Each structure stands twice: as C-alpha cells, then as structure tokens.
C-alpha cells in the first residue's frame, strides 16, 4: 500500500465514505501478507523509500509469479533479481506489463518513471563481468539514479580507463565489478575522490577459487574509500551506491518523495 493510498483511505473515512471496518480490512495487508510459502512485505517503500525487490533464485517460477503479482497490487515499481528464463516467463504471464532484462537477470515492473539524478558509474574489468554489472546498473536506474556504463576497462589495459577519466571523476560513486585478481577497484580508487563500491565476480582461472581471490584482493585494497560487497552481489552494490549518490545529490528523503 502506497502512502497516498493510506491518505485517501483516512480522508474517505473522515468524510464517512467508508467504514472503519473497511479501513481496517485494507490495513491488514499493509505491513505484510502471508501466502503460505512467503510473507510479502508491502511496507518497504513507506519505511525506507525503496521499492520492494524480490530475490528469484531458489524460488519456483510459480512462486515468483504469485509474489510478483501480489506486490504489483500495492507498488508502482517492483524488481525481481536473479530471474531465470522460466521465472521471467511465468511473471510476465501473471503481470504482462513486466519487462525481462535478460543480461542482468532482472524482471521489472515500472509504472512510475523519473529522470535519474546525480551520477553513478558502473565499470567492469572485462566483458565477462557484464551480467553482474548489468544487475547493478538496472537496479540503480530503477531506483532513480543516473547511470553510465564503462565496460571492459580493467587493469590489464589501464589506458582504457584513463580514456574515460573525466567521466569517472564526475560521478558521485563508482561501482567497480571485476573477477580475476580484482584489481579494478584499487585502480579506480586511485584516480577518484568519491566512494568506490567493489564487486568481486566468480570469473577467473583455477586459483581464483570461484571469486575468493578477487574478494580478498578487494578487501585488501591499498586505495582508500573502497568498500566491498559479496561475490556477484550487483544488487547490494547498487543499493549502497544509490544511497551515496542521493546523499551527494541533495538528500535521500527529498529525492525519493
């Protein structure tokens, strides 16, 4: 339930257009809604200003579709992250207006669109890191942050990053996605004066240990201002970068109203 719906209900009751029992009946699904296998959160946007995001991995297509459908009743914007093809098809059958972004594995319903504010750069070490980066970029865009993508700009060809140094320095935050030895966040952190959110990926040969090598390298970055999320966590990086960007752009609460 959106804040304007709550206001409308209360004003309608004040005008004796609906009974207090009708108001209470609608409020029953305000905080959450149990559907057997899930307890759906309808209160998230009221609590912190962000739309609900469903994590698809591990859910059946049918479960994801039902949760998404219930969320669509009380939210303008909804995201399902880590959605498989089968899950995306099921969601779109239930909610035809939903859009599937295959590369980022995101299913999105966006009824409310705003011009992005500020600027966050999403950069990758290599082309193979793009799926994780796209997850971050799509989430940032859905949250109302302006995003620029800078892909295949890893430390193995440092000149590729320097070519775009002017753009990178205009950002309020940089999300740096990399596998292998995970050097990109340190390199970016050495040329910017804004926070860098590092995202290790599982890509790399043998001793990369499924992204552990990149994770440890990023945790031990010699550049200041680098924070690290878990392996492949593009969504978590986007959430943090969005908060940083909106603070820099003039205040979280003001921008999300």
Image (tube, rainbow, N blue to C red):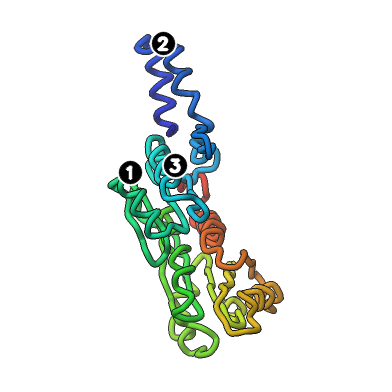
Viewer-nearest of discs 2 and 1: 1
The residues bearing labels 2 and 3 have C-alpha atoms spaced at a distance of 29 Å
Disc 2 target residue: 19
In this picture, residue 191 sits left or right of residue 151: right
Q: Would you call the spot at circle 3 few (<14 residues within 10 Å), some (14-19), or many (20 or more)?
A: many
Residue 247: percent from the left, percent from the top? 54, 54
Q: Is residue 196 visible?
A: no
Instruction: Tell me whether the residue at label 2 lies in contact with that at label 3, contact meaning CB atoms closer than 8 angstroms.
Output: no
**Rendered view: 187 above or below 147:** below
Residue lying at the far left of the rendered structure: 96
Q: CA distance from mark 3 to mark 1?
A: 10 Å
Q: Earlier in the sequence, mark 2 or mark 1?
A: 2
Q: Specify whether 8 is left or right of 33.
A: left
Query: Where is mark 3, residue-wise?
Result: 67
Residue 20: percent from the left, percent from the top?
45, 12
Element under disc 1 = helix
Residue located at (48% from left, 75% from top): 129
Residue holding disc 1: 94
x, y percent for residue 130? 45, 73
Task: Tell me if mark 2 has few (under 14), some (14-19) or many (20+) residues whose alpha carbon lies within 10 angstroms of its own.
Answer: some
Looking at the image, is mark 2 or mark 3 nearer the viewer?
Answer: 3
Q: Is residue 245 above or below residue 252?
A: below
């Amino acid at each position: 339930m959106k804040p304007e719906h709550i206001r409308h209900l209360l004003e309608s009751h004040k005008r004796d257009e609906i009974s207090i029992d009708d108001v209470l009946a609608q409020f029953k699904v305000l905080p959450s809604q149990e559907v057997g296998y899930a307890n759906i959160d309808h209160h998230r946007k009221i609590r912190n200003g962000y739309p609900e995001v469903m994590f698809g991995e591990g859910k059946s297509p049918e479960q994801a579709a039902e949760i998404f459908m219930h969320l669509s009743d009380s939210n303008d914007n909804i995201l399902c992250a880590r959605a498989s093809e089968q899950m995306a098809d099921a969601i779109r059958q239930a909610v035809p207006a939903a859009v599937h972004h295959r590369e980022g594995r995101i299913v999105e319903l966006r009824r409310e669109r705003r011009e992005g504010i500020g600027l966050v750069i999403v950069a990758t070490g290599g082309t193979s890191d793009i799926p994780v980066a796209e997850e971050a970029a799509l989430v940032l865009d859905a949250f109302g942050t302006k995003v620029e993508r800078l892909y295949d700009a890893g430390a193995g060809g440092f000149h590729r990053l320097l070519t775009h140094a002017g753009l990178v320095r205009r950002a309020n935050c940089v999300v740096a996605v990399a596998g292998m030895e995970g050097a990109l966040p340190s390199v970016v952190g050495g040329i910017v004066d804004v926070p860098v959110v590092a995202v290790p990926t599982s890509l790399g040969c043998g001793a990369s240990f499924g992204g552990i090598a990149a994770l440890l390298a990023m945790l031990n970055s010699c550049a200041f201002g680098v924070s690290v999320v878990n392996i492949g966590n593009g969504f978590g990086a986007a959430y943090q970068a969005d908060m940083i960007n909106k603070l820099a752009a003039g205040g979280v609460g003001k921008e999300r109203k």
